[in-house]
Each structure stands twice: as C-alpha cells, then as structure tokens.
Image (tube, helix red, strand yellow):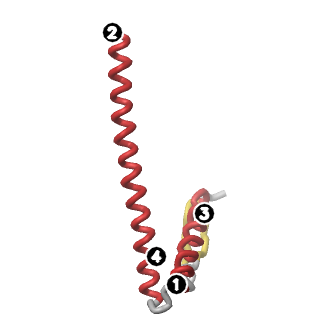
Amino acid sequence: MTDKLNITIRIAGQKPMTLNIDRDYEETARTAEFQVNRLYGLWSDRFRDKSSMEVMSMVAYRFAELFYTQNSAAAAAERLLDDFERELDRILVDTAVK
C-alpha cells in the first residue's frame, strides 16, 4: 500500500484541484479546505460589496496572518525553553559540584 493519496479539494466554488499528499496529511488538508471555505462563505455574505477575488484575498491574508502569528509564538516558546534548559543545566551542574 502506498503512503500517498490523491484527493480532490474545491476552494470557494472554483475548479476542483487534485492533490497528491501523504496519507497521514489527509485530515489536515480536508480541515484546511473546510476552514477556508467556511471563512470565505461567512465573509462573502458579510461583505456583499466585495468581489469574490477581494474576499478570497482577505481570506488568504487572514490565514497568512494566523500562520505568522503562530510561527512567532512557537519561536518565542522555543527560545524560552532553550533558556530554561540552559538555566536548569547550570543549576544541576552547580548542585553536582557542591
């Protein structure tokens, strides 16, 4: 059995796209499709004066913003853990020497 899977997704009523993905990535891909379509639908209803391209641009921006916010938070958490680990190592070494 192959670890790859062909799936078809449709974003904002556009032409379906076929993706060749790792089998364990399917849930993530389908969740992403669902969430993009959900936000697109909500904002299409809310911003009726905007074109579909403008709404999709807003959706793309929102997801990019969320990605970079999470990326920044993960980097900050990694720095905090690195600092904690260094301090813990220093304390353990000091304790062992005494």
Instruction: Give the mark nearer the N terminus: 4 vs 2.
Output: 4
Is residue 2 visible in the rendered structure shown here?
yes
Amino acid at dot 1: Arg
Question: Which quarter of the figure has residue 82?
Answer: top left
> Tag 2's secondary structure?
helix
Q: Which mark is residue 26?
A: 3
Name the residue type under label 4.
Val
- The amino acid at mark 3 is Glu
Provide the residue designation for mark 2: 97
Q: Nearer the viewer, mark 3 or mark 2?
A: 2
Q: Secondary structure at mark 1?
A: helix
- Distance, label 3 to label 2, CA atoms, is 52 Å
At a point 54% along the width and 82% down the height, the residue shown is: 12
Label 3 vs 2, first from the N-terminus: 3
Q: Looking at the image, which residue is at 38% across and 61% down?
A: 68
**Sequence-wise first label, 3 or 4:** 3
Q: CA distance from mark 4 to mark 1?
A: 13 Å
| Label 4 environment density (alpha carbons within 10 Å; few <14, some 14–19, many ≥20) | some
The quadrant in which the N terminus is found is bottom right
